[in-house]
Amino acid sequence: MNDREALLNLIATLSFRLGDFTLSSGAKSDYYIDCRITTLHAEGGRLTGLVLYDLIRQHFPQAEAVGGLTMGADPVVSNTASASAWYAKDHPGTPLLNGFLVRKQPKGHGAGRQVEGFLKSGAKVVVVDDVCTTGGSTITAIEAVKAAGMDIIGILCLVDREQGGRANIEAAAEGAPFISAFTANDVRAAHIALPIQKQ
């Protein structure tokens, strides 16, 4: 089983539930995906970093940093940045990816920053999120990153629920491509295929 398959299996096992749910957008759904259970899991976090870093190397090799809106993106950012360091250890000369986190509101004290961690005007960056529905969280991050003067070259999402988020995000990012590691249908199919259904 490769890293991508292993990560999908963990999300399907740990993070996917069938039932009656109201999403943050207010919409009703017969399933819920809480990727934080997977991204904060020791092996799930490691796999998240490896899979997303692989996508960045494939599609956005010029990226200098990766970041997203706290708190769904926090473990995604940390694990992806760490994966770049582990890769560089075995491939000398490979640039490292730094990480940054975006607060929902600028900090009311100290430096008053909304973007914490890596911050360099003109830097080429990738914005990440764990689950994308309508794209609201990702768009909040995109707006803050643009206001900070960084250049968004791509957006990555662990799971796309395919409910309009892609179009909204790409519009907010002014055409930067949106790529998801998995769709909700991928996760649902993997969940249903599990030998013992998680209750």
Image (spheres, rainbow, N blue to C red):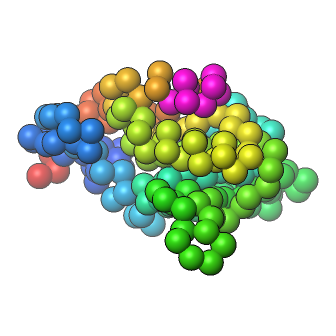
Is residue 153 visible to the viewer in this orientation of the structure?
yes
For the view shown, which residue lies furthest in the right direction?
93
In the image: residue 103, left or right of residue 97: left
- Give x and y (percent) for residue 127: 60, 44
Viewed as shown, does residue 13 lie left or right of 44?
left
Residue ID at (56%, 76%): 109
Q: Is residue 195 visible?
A: no
Percent across and percent down for residue 22 are: 16, 42
Is 95 magenta? The answer is no
Which residue occupies the foreground of this view, 155 or 17? 155
- From this viewpoint, which residue is outermost toward the left? 20
| Residue 174: in magenta span | yes
Report the span colored magenta: 169-176
Q: Residue at x 74, y 46 (%)?
A: 149
Residue in the foreground of this view, choosing between 92 and 149: 149
Name, please, the residue furthest toward the bottom: 110
Which of 12/64 is in front?
64
Indicate the quadrant where residue 142 lies: top right
Q: Is residue 163 above or below residue 31?
A: above
Q: Residue at x 63, y 25 (%)?
A: 174
